[in-house]
Image (cartoon, rainbow, N blue to C red):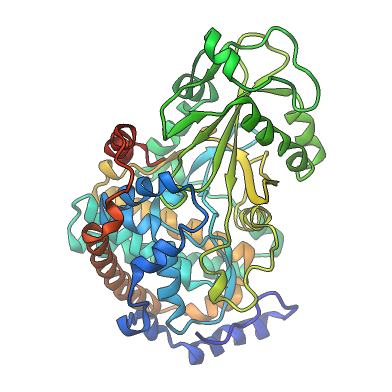
Amino acid sequence: MGRMMPSRTPLRYPERRALGLRARKQLPRSEQARLVMAACPQDPLALLHASMRDRVAHLIPVKYQRMAASPFGFFRGAVPIMAADLAGHPNSGILTQLCGDAHVLNLGAFAALDGRMVFDINDFDETIRGPFEYDVKRLAASLILAGREAGIKRSSRHEAVLHFLRQYRTWMHHFAAMPVLELARYQIHRLAQMEPMPAILAHAVRSTPQKILKSLTEPETARSRSEGPQRGRLRQPAPAAIPSRVFRSDPPLLERLNAREAGAVLAALGPYIRTLQPERQHFLQQYGPQDVAFKVVGTGSVGLRDYVIYCEGLSRPHATDPLFLQIKQEEASAYDRYLPGGSGHRHQGHRVVDGQRAMQLISDPFLGYTTLEGRDYLVRQLNDHKAALDLAELTPSSLLGYADVCGEVLSRGHARAGDPVAVAAYLGSSDRFDQAILTFAQSYANKTERDWSLLKRSSLLRPSSGSGGMKKALARTQMRAR
């Protein structure tokens, strides 16, 4: 609902500011607080069920089980529900590139190509151009839900949300005043001094490719050698001295592919390589694929096809230079059907790549896309020096510090990809917008808990398959959400 105002127009500063001020008439800031249940779909679980249409059927119970673990777990997998809920309400019409699934666990640390640890939004499966407040509302609601899960009292949760919103607004005004290239280069330098960031960054440093190698693979046996895929360089045969490790078997969460299946996945690397810059192609061609597996990841993505490729640097003989690539199926953003014109992308992997590069200061050097058996895929590194917030360790002070960082990071992403002048003009200098979003976030957290209760009572949690392997997977799936 609401008329979408263009954000990529060659307007001068006064015109851009006027656009933001006019948006207050379209949707007054105080109206951002409203959550009208009558405007939300009356059967949220039907939306959730419909989103499973092209997913791997036997993995759908794993997704529902992960969502049933807690209201925050439900929130992570319920983007289709929130997209419909937001679409049923008026919006500001000020567009930017959305993360689309902005929540506290979709920001994290990862390694830049030069080896530095950076912290940014790191999940863009739902990215699309849309009203800027959609991301703000979702991240604010996630702070409430994460705080509740951690047992943090109401006043501290609300303080954290207001601090997040104040930081978002304050930094948007800073970005609106910056020269274009200064904004494009802007880095956040204060992370090491802010709780809980030192622990997150330290964990990222320890999450090396060698550590991933030990956790995901095991020594090769005669049987696994005969059953596994044919090895080879990305374009040329590998030398004989190859590492003798293959993926572990942990069905249904991690399963090696046979030679035929792996061959189809490896064939998709050809089109993917052409989406990389020439120097990135050069680096990648110095690795040879050793094994391929199917991996269950996340919460919202469970059931989508996700493949991992274990590669080794060809210049070193004994598993000392591992690289893990992830080939992840991408569907249309949950917001696509509600926004005029949708994403404008025919290839959903390309959509994610463009959205990620628009919002992030530094992106994965091997970020690209491909097509496999008629489906669209994103390609990226798997867990290279990645780390995120640990909800079990949250305290009132660390939630407040994390909210501070979230405000600056989200504001930077929106400013990079949209019009910070228009957004800043809409936000203004008062806390009217902040208070409205806090009210919305509290209401939406309550709605999420009600929807979660519906799931807990529904037939969706009673899988038709009662195999022992699936039951064991469901029992331990809460420990494997990432």
Task: Tell me where residue 82 appears, x and y as whole percent.
Answer: 40, 68
Task: Tell me where residue 157 appears, x and y as whole percent.
Answer: 25, 60
> Is 3 drawn above or below residue 292 in the view shown?
below
Residues 170 and 159: in front is 159
Look at 62% across and 18% down and name the residue there.
Answer: 321
Look at 51% across and 32% down and name the residue there.
Answer: 385
Task: Tell me where residue 436 appears, x and y as whole percent.
Answer: 34, 78
* Left or right of 390 on screen, residue 15: right
Residues 159 and 88: in front is 88
**Numbered-mark total:** 0
* Left or right of 338 on screen, residue 397: left
> Is 277 drawn above or below residue 211 in the view shown?
below
Q: Does residue 98 appear in this view?
A: yes
Q: Quadrant of residue 22?
A: bottom right
Residues 248 and 260: in front is 260
**For the C terminus, which image quadrant?**
top left
Task: Tell me where residue 299 appears, x and y as whole percent.
Answer: 40, 49
* Left or right of 263 on screen, residue 30: left
> Is 43 drawn above or below residue 246 in the view shown?
below
* Left or right of 215 on screen, residue 95: right
